[in-house]
Amino acid sequence: MRKFWLVLVVMAFGLSSCGLNKVRALLPIGETATPEPVAVAVAPSVDAITWHSCNDKSIRSEDSSKFDCSTVDVPLDYAQPDGEKISIAVIRLPASGSRTGAILYNPGGPGGSGFDYVASMGHTYVDKLHLEGFDFVGFDPRGVDRSGGLRCQTDKELDKYMYPDTTPDTPEEKAFLQAAYDSFAAACKVKYGAKLKFYSTENTARDMDMIRIAIGDEKISYLGVSYGTYLGAVYASMFPTHVRAMVLDSAFEPKGDSIEERYMTQEKGFEKAMNNWIAWCEKDDKCAFHASDVGVRWDALYTKLDNQPVAGKDGRMVNQEVLDTATKSALYSQSRWGELAQALADADSGDVAGVWQLADSYNDRQDDGTYLTSNQSQNVITCASGILYDAVPNADELLKKMQTEAPRMSRGATAEQLAAPSDCRVYMDVMPIAAVQYTGSAPILIVGGENDPATPMRWSTKMHDEMGPHAALLTYSGEGHGQVLESKCVNAAASQVLTAMKLPADGSKCDPDPDVTMPSWWQRLPADVSGAVAIDATTMRDAMQFKASELYLQAWFVPGTNQKDVISDYDVTMATAGFTNPDDPKEISGGLLKYFCDGKDCVGVLVLDATALAKPDWDSVSKLVPANHCLVIYLYFPE
């Protein structure tokens, strides 16, 4: 279930790579060309932005009136400002009350849609970071979805080549694997040719400044996650006087790594995250994939799917590569550990729906079988930005080390693949990489995670050193990738930077929030209705992708088929207990949510009937509820 409502954990993109080598399938790090100085050019003229109402499927109908949308036309090639244009799609959650300015947001990738993220979780960022005085602005970077999205391959071609067997056993499998590796770059070269080199990080930074000018602000603030930190750092380096404040969350710094570090950094990071997940699942007997040795059980499932792939409901086959992608997808956030365990347990029994849900979310495959452009955009943007994998001179030696230090995450890698030249060379020359060297005086907060599987702490330290004396480094000690919204301590620091332009002490540290426990007033809530059957709280929380530190809940399924009747009964029963709310319930992805309060104490009552549970957002929850029943959940989010 996608928790686009209530509270969202930041998930920066870890994107697959259209059939390319699976060892290259995470946020790309790699060989870079010799850095060249970033020239600060005079921006071309741009019209003032004209905001209008949004008509976009990413915005829930109940939220459509809360957002404004527009486009900003920018040059494809800034050396020819009057030449071909790209329309950059922009969305904002407008400031309430007195407006301080705009905060631009980028979720990472590269290739992630800032438009979608602001549409789905803009309210969460504004609420948790107290950004009500700002326009919270997302945009699709050039080459992404609404902004001239790059589509080198069709959706059918992506399905065909996404998961080749990287351990081929027959000549046919070997030939298909090679075709999968070659298909994307060849298709891009045919469709776009020389234009692909213009989809660089540096040009996207220029686009950001065009957005700033179109909005009419002298300076902008910025919040970027993962690759979005590099984009923000490049912008600050190019336009140091145009920055008001920045929060760079889970820094990605692509320069200076050795060949070994390029190929092993994320493999080791995800190996560590998986080992942490394994230890949790072995310790907690409520973990759906529980065993005395969870790692051995996962290995056995991997081998089984390698030898005999299993068909999903739509006929797509789950092999070991799909399992690998699904596992990595869940390791980005501890909130998805329970979902991963259930998906693996189901797959072990022949039901691969949960594995497909995780893998498809990782690759931005939609319910109708279409893909967002994130996979294809990522490959082009990294190449155009000078960030590439290239031939490894000591491939056999490196492969042996990878298999020793990250045995699960390096499965499928071969010395032949490591020794092959970068696919980037098929459709463009090696491009220069934009330097990071901030000379301005605006406050810059870099947040790094000690247990971040995708972006190691050393990248945050490196970026902190490059951003000058007005930057501060904050370390988060918990699990996961993307630290803002993960703890109140991190949120408070990010909020102070963006709202008051005040940095925390350099070198500060934040720990995870403690688990939310049952509040003392909980016992006053109405008892179970007749016929109600309790659902284990941990199981429900995992299905909803929440951590124990985010909320306390209780859940039941109750007889009935109409959620309106069920929730209206709570107006009476809650009032008897002293909890009231005269307002109508709000629709949440087809369900109904109503908060009842007694002074400062509030509980949310969420009710879902069969019609609501049939919606894709509730896939992982619906299996917990039998036919002809409604799901009732009491929710408590501490302040």
Image: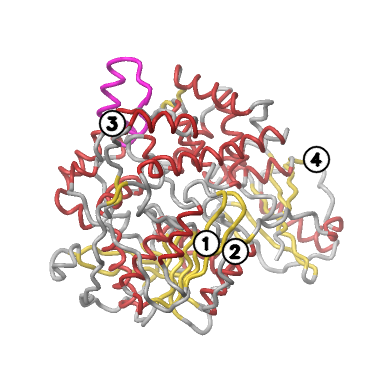
Q: Earlier in the sequence, mark 3 or mark 2?
A: 3
| Of marks 1 and 2, the one in the foreground | 1
Q: Are marks 1 and 2 in contact (CB under 8 Å)?
A: yes
Which residue is under mark 4?
A: 531
CA gap, disc 1 and disc 3: 37 Å
Disc 2 secondary structure class: helix
Quarter the C terminus occupies = bottom right
Amino acid type, residue under disc 4 in the picture: Gly
Q: Are marks 1 and 3 in contact (CB under 8 Å)?
A: no
Residue at the spot x=37%, y=72% of the render?
A: 52
Closer to the camera in the image, 404 or 493: 404
Q: Earlier in the sequence, mark 1 or mark 3?
A: 3
Q: Which residues are magenta?
A: 158-181
Amino acid type, residue under disc 3 in the picture: Ala
**Can you tell which mark lies on residue 447?**
1
Per the picture, the main secondary structure of the magenta-coloured stretch is helix
Amino acid type, residue under disc 2 in the picture: Val
Q: Earlier in the sequence, mark 1 or mark 2?
A: 1
Q: At which x and y percent is residue 246?
A: 46, 70
Q: Are marks 3 and 2 in contact (CB under 8 Å)?
A: no
Which residue is under mark 3?
A: 180
Amino acid type, residue under disc 1 in the picture: Val
465 to 317, vertically: above or below: below
CA gap, disc 3 and disc 2: 42 Å
Which residue is under mark 2?
A: 490
| Of marks 4 and 3, the one in the foreground | 3
